[in-house]
Amino acid sequence: MNTNNWNLNYIPDLSGKFIIVTGGNSGLGFEAVKALSNKNAHIILACRNLSKGEKAKSDILKQSPKANINVMELDLASLESVRNFASNYKKNHTTLDVLINNAGIMMVPYGLTTDGFEKQLGTNHLGHFALTGLLLDVLKKSPASRVVNVSSIAHRSGEMIFDNLLFENGKDYTPMKSYGRSKLANLLFTFELQRFFEANKIDCSAIAVHPGVSDTDLFDHVAPKWVLKALHPLFSLMIQPASMGALPELRAATDPNAKGGEYYGPDGKREMKGYPVLVNPTNAAKSKEDAKKLWEISEKLTSIIYK
């Protein structure tokens, strides 16, 4: 596929734009916050740990003293935290131009969120589903606003098994099986959200992305640290830096030509690394039936009704 080597130079001036980046204190999110603040956007850096968020802000300010960044607490594994975040945001802002649902956990051992959901689907999908729904009113008030959901090439292995969606009591759970399902859920949600916007004539776009294989701390649970350290020279041949991995979400958030329902990822071999271009999800991700069913279950589980 042809590429124009889309990079940070293509990001337009974002003065006056309000952008939320979940998980903005490290990895892809940190790179996104840095790039967007350099283009004069008002950034809300949302993260679980406020001290880590403040350190990330401080690191960016050292390079870009004029960056406009506010750190806010958000734990996507707690619906109470999600509600508090949305409420606090709306106390101080009446609009939202871009919501980047970037945060996520990867291949962690079986566990539960505060609300009793399996942790990976609960954090990666349900937390962002709730957050987006709670911020819908301010997205509606912003012309041509966007929701960017970060999926993964791991969605290709994902399966939506609705009679055991949350791996009850750990039944059939494996870290990879759950992660793949959560990333497939990100895509199903994106495409159903775009259909919701269109059906309700809402001037907002839902766009999905994936970062390829990028060098972030998400790999911490894949293997012991000494193994990861020993294999890093080999990994470095296959992975790209977080600054490159963040480009798909930055393109989806800022490219004037990006459209709702699109999916961006790296242009390299097997989409593992490279510059962001339009890519294709699996047929499972395109299932309107599964997307509708997931949406209905998500509304029920989170008690967040989109309207």
Image (cartoon, rainbow, N blue to C red):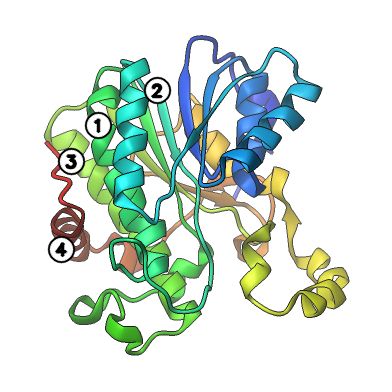
Residue 12, by quadrant, is top right
| Cβ atoms at labels 4 and 2 below 8 Å apart | no
Query: Mark 1 or mark 4: which comes first in sequence?
Result: 1
Instruction: Using the numbered discs, state the Cα–Cα distance from disc 1 to disc 2 in whole angstroms.
Output: 11 Å
Identify the residue under disc 1: 136
Q: Give the labeled residue for mark 4.
A: 293
Label 3 amino acid? Phe
The disc labelled 4 sits on which kind of residue? Lys
Residue type for callout 2: Asp
Label 4 to label 2, Cα distance in Å?
28 Å
User: 89 left or right of 168?
Assistant: right
Where in the figure is residue 20, as x and y percent of width and height?
A: 46, 31
Q: Amino acid at mark 1?
A: Leu
Looking at the picture, tell me which residue is in the foreground, 53 or 306.
53
User: Separation of disc 3 and disc 4 at Cα?
Assistant: 14 Å
Residue at (31, 23) in percent of width and height: 90
Q: Is residue 89 above or below residue 148?
A: above
Which residue bears the numbered disc 2? 97
- Quarter of the figure with the C terminus: top left
Residue 18, relative to residue 154: is it above or below?
above
Secondary structure beneath dot 1 equals helix
- What's the residue at 41%, 58% (across, down)? 124
The number of numbered discs placed on residues in the rendered structure image is 4
User: x, y (%) of residue 257?
Assistant: 46, 28
- Tell me, yes or no, whether the two marked residues, 3 and 2, touch with CB atoms within 8 Å: no
Which of the 4 image quadrants contains residue 29? top right
Tell which residue pokes out farthest to the bottom in this image.
172
Left or right, 120 with reference to 159: right
Determine which residue is flagged by label 3: 196
Q: Earlier in the sequence, mark 3 or mark 2?
A: 2
